[in-house]
Amino acid sequence: MIKTRAQQNSLMQKQLPKKLHIGCGTKYLEGWLNIDNLRGTPDKKIDLEKFPWPLPSDYFEEVYCSHVLEHLSDVQKTMDEIWRCCAQGAIVMIKVPHFSSMAAPSPFHKHSFNSQAMNYFSRGEEKYGKANFRILSTRIFWYPDDAEYVSHSSKRKIASLVGKFLDFFINLNRSFFERVWLYYVGGAFEIEWKLKVEKKR
């Protein structure tokens, strides 16, 4: 028997966590639905380049997507798909390498980003696609903000302390940093956005 879309969504939702971890790799988060198709041991193997993803619509309340968007071919379709899968008011955390990062020109990266990138997916004159997010916060990090990474050596701990000092001044005026003085401090490592899904008109 052919099921309606609503019935298919209902079946997919059974026992699914409300939190979605996109492109989990080897970083498995307990209590989340960890998805990936390249490595690690995800809860669900999904090809993120094929749309729509086999996930229910209007369901997830929280999404974490760290260092994934730069590897995917179509950023707009990916953001539209994240928006589709999320419930109204869901919180979406996205991290990508900053365009000035030494990692940004990796041959495995298909896109680079500055601090304005998510403006194209929020309500305004420049919005594209279906997705509509409210940008709650934008932060540029000079050094990785990952406690596990930093704790590996004393050099990383020192660099992290320097980074926290620089982060304060960088985020006072991100546009000025990106246009004028970023290369005087060796660029930045990553950008983090906190977004809120808006669906009600």
Image: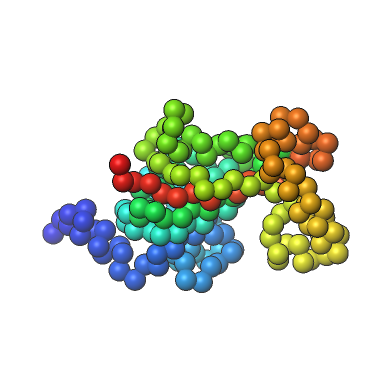
Q: Residue at x 48, y 34 (%)?
A: 120
Q: Quadrant of residue 27?
A: bottom right
The answer to whether residue 37 of the structure is visible from this angle is no
Q: Residue furthest left?
A: 1
Quadrant (top left/top right/bottom left/bottom right) for the N terminus = bottom left
In the visual, does 168 lie left or right of 36?
right
Q: Residue at x 83, y 36 (%)?
A: 184
Q: Residue at x 40, y 41 (%)?
A: 132
Quadrant (top left/top right/bottom left/bottom right) for the C terminus = top left
Percent position (x, y) of residue 82? Answer: 42, 49
Colour mode of the rendering: rainbow
Percent position (x, y) of residue 134? Answer: 46, 44
The answer to whether residue 57 of the structure is visible from this angle is yes
Judge by depth and name the residue closer to the eye, 175 or 68. 175
Percent position (x, y) of residue 38? Answer: 53, 55
Judge by depth and name the residue closer to the eye, 167 or 146. 167
In the visual, does 104 lie left or right of 76?
right
